[in-house]
Image: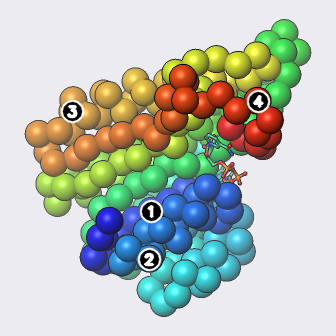
């Protein structure tokens, strides 16, 4: 993969999978903006990638913060080529035990965050007539597990958002993909993760 100076925003990129994507993109020649609710960690992660990368303050559930963060990247870099909508959390309990606030929190970070960041980057990508949006899905974009109702619901919904933007944006040079392992290849009963 060669990114040759392409401007890449990665939400939730201060740790975990997002940080690994950031390292991979930077190694491929991309210029990375790590957008995270933890600004200190985002700046530290960006510095660890080398020169030219940046940390951006962004709570993906806050429309103003998302717009501000994306505007800053476009202003500083002059364009925006790749969005990785990756920020996420997990809360594990039975459906009837979820409070509405807990449900909203999980759905909001995964799905509202994907919508808000997409909405913010699309005008620039359409202006450039090029851009790529990657949504961090999961095996739970295609199948369910007990105890993860809002997570499974939001990860399924990302498929719908990606397909809609593919239809609206295809002719304007924007493509979308959901990163998701296939259910039949994901069986790994011993693996434990905080968010998957
Ligand atoms: N860990 C797994 O096994 C696994 C499997 C499949 C998919 N995923 C998905 O990958 C993504 C990253 O997961 P991870 O395990 O690396 O998580 P993680 O907890 O290591 O990292 C999540 C990052 O998101 C940030 N974040 C949290 N809330 C935010 C908000 N409101 N706004 C901006 N940033 C916010 C955190 O500060 C953190 O840096 C998630 O979407 C998750 O659902 C994870």
Tell me how far mark 2 sits from mark 1, CA to CA.
15 Å
Which residue matches tag 1?
Answer: 9
In the rendered image, the quadrant that contains the N terminus is bottom left
Mark 3 or mark 2: whose residue is earlier in sequence: 2
Tell me how far mark 2 sits from mark 4, CA to CA.
32 Å
Mark 3, secondary structure of its residue = helix
Q: Position of residue 72 (x, y in %)?
A: 43, 70
**Is the C-beta separation of discs 3 and 1 under 8 Å?**
no
- Residue count near mark 4 (Cα–Cα under 10 Å), binned few <14, some 14–19, many ≥20: few
Q: Position of residue 32 (x, y in %)?
A: 45, 72
In the rendered image, the quadrant that contains the C terminus is top right
- Residue count near mark 1 (Cα–Cα under 10 Å), binned few <14, some 14–19, many ≥20: many
Residue 27, labelled with which disc?
2
Mark 3 or mark 4: whose residue is earlier in sequence: 3
Tell me how far mark 3 sits from mark 2, CA to CA.
31 Å
**Is the C-beta separation of discs 1 and 4 under 8 Å?**
no
């Amino acid at each position: 993969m060669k990114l040759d100076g392409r401007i890449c925003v990665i939400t939730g990129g201060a740790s975990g999978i997002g940080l690994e994507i950031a390292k991979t993109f930077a190694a491929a020649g991309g210029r990375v903006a790590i957008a995270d609710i933890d600004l200190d960690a985002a700046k530290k992660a960006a510095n660890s990638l080398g020169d030219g990368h940046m940390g951006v303050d962004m709570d993906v559930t806050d429309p103003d913060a998302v717009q501000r963060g994306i505007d800053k990247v476009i202003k500083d870099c002059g364009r925006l080529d790749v969005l990785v909508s990756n920020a996420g959390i997990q809360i594990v309990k039975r459906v009837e035990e979820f409070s509405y606030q807990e449900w909203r929190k999980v759905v909001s970070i995964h799905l509202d965050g994907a919508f808000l960041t997409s909405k913010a980057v699309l005008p620039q990508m359409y202006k450039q007539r090029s851009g790529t949006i990657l949504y961090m899905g999961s095996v739970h974009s295609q199948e369910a597990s007990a105890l993860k109702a809002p997570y499974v619901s939001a990860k399924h919904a990302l498929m719908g958002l990606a397909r809609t933007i593919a239809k609206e944006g295809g002719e304007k040079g924007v493509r979308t993909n959901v990163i998701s392992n296939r259910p039949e290849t994901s069986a790994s009963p011993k693996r434990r993760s905080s968010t998957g």
